[in-house]
Amino acid sequence: MLHPVSRLTWLDERAEATRTPPVESLDPLLDPNWDLHLGRHVLSTVFHSQGWARTLQETYGHRPVYCGLRDDAGISALLPMVEAKTWLTSRRGISLPFSDSCPPLGTVEDTMRLAAHVVDVGRKRGWRFIEFRDFPHKLLGGESSLSFKSHILDIHRPESAVLAGFEGSVRRAIRKAESSELDIHISQEAAAIRDYYDLHCLTRKRHGLFPQPSRFFASLHRNVIAKGGGFVTLAKKNERWVAGTVFLISGINACYKYGASDERFQALRGNNLVMWRSIQECQKRGCHSLDFGRTSADNEGLRRFKLSYGARENDLHYLRLDLRGMSADRLVDRSSGRVNSVIRLLPLWAARLAGEALYPHAS
């Protein structure tokens, strides 16, 4: 069996020998028709979009180093990649930071050629490693650095059929929330993302996680949500926001990116109602599938929550190639541990400040 990096190089050399189109360097921030190119790819998501690339660049300074292949119809294959470096971290390539899943677009052979090109770029630019998120790991002999679970719900069905696929406990929770007379607001306005962010910080702290910087959500709103690439759903009771979600959309694919709630109002089941109203909104916008995002393998509670909506479970593989040792690294899922207990003890303002300072180094 060929070594992972050797296999990439071999396939790239074979493609060059057959005079296939050359690999091109692409910058989504400079192409006004970028999102139109993505329309031909059924697997493209919001994480491939120009708005997401601009959000990463504005918030964290990540430099796009995308590569692709073209034909007469436009971009036929694509591998998104950014160069990330801070004063605390080494220079590295990631496809893509803070993106649960960002699969290459194109054929298997195209994907291998693009990955080989990125390895060459990384060597020249002195990258410590390259990390692919949702890379077809079997192409490299089954190598995988870390695995998660993903959950996809088919929403290209009548509303009644989608609802019938929920577990009985979920349907009962939705009915209870409706009887609680919660006010539901679905919006693309900046005020909605700010209201959601307050709930988000509370929830992240409760789970022992630093919240993302507020400037990230402002940029996400400006570059994605305000341009039709998503929406915020909020539930209110007696002038208090009790639950909220952020959904992102690209073409026929929707993504449940963030969810938050005020645990003091948990009995109202606002979480279930904003989820259901969000799914209905995605259907209205013509979406066929809903990605619930990645789940750590040992987070059984979150996994059960997503399965309770009738979602199909898949494996999600991350691959990190060490460009010094020319091998696949083993990664550890650090979403839980001792640090989480410390974060829970922090005042909310301290958790926010820590998130502002540390998130740029966490790519």
Image (spheres, helix red, strand yellow):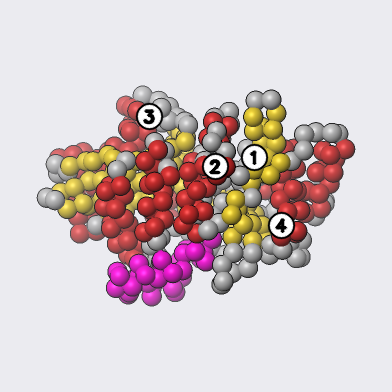
As drawn, which residue projects farthest toward the left? 238
Name the one closer to the observer, 78 or 173.
Answer: 78
Where 163 falls versus 199 (above or below)?
A: above
Residue 75 lies within the magenta run: no
**x then y, percent, for residue 323:** 73, 61
Q: Secondary structure at mark 2?
A: helix
Which residue is at 32% across, 61% downward? Answer: 201
The 10 Å Cα crowd at callout 4, few under 14, some 14 to 19, many 20 or more, is many
Labelled pair 2, 1 in contact (Cβ < 8 Å): yes
**At numbered mark 4, what does the secondary structure look like: helix, strand or loop?**
helix
Few, some or many residues within 10 Å of mark 3 (<14, 14–19, 20+): some
Earlier-in-chain disc, 2 versus 3? 2
Q: Position of residue 195 (x, y in %)?
A: 26, 52
Q: Which residues are magenta?
A: 334-363
Mark found first going from the N terminus, 2 or 4: 2
**Residue assigned mark 3:** 285
**Residue 184 on image: x %, y %:** 22, 41
First of labels 2, 1 by sequence position: 2
Q: Work out whether 350 lies above or below 274.
A: below
Between the residue at mark 3 and the residue at mark 1, the CA separation in whole angstroms equals 26 Å
Query: Which amino acid does the dot numbered 4 rest on?
Result: Gly
Identify which residue is drawn at 46% across, 64% down.
Answer: 359
Residue 362, given in percent of the width and then of the height, sits at 51, 64
Gap in angstroms between the C-alphas marked 2 and 1: 9 Å
Instruction: Find the residue positioned furthest to the right.
Output: 17
N-term mark: 3 or 1: 1
Name the residue beneath numbered marker 2: 48
As for residue 355 lying within the magenta part, the answer is: yes
Distance (Cα) linking label 1 and label 4: 17 Å
- Graded by Cα atoms within 10 Å as few (under 14), some (14 to 19) or many (20 or more), the crowding at tag 2 reads many
> Mark 4 and mark 3: span between their CA atoms?
39 Å
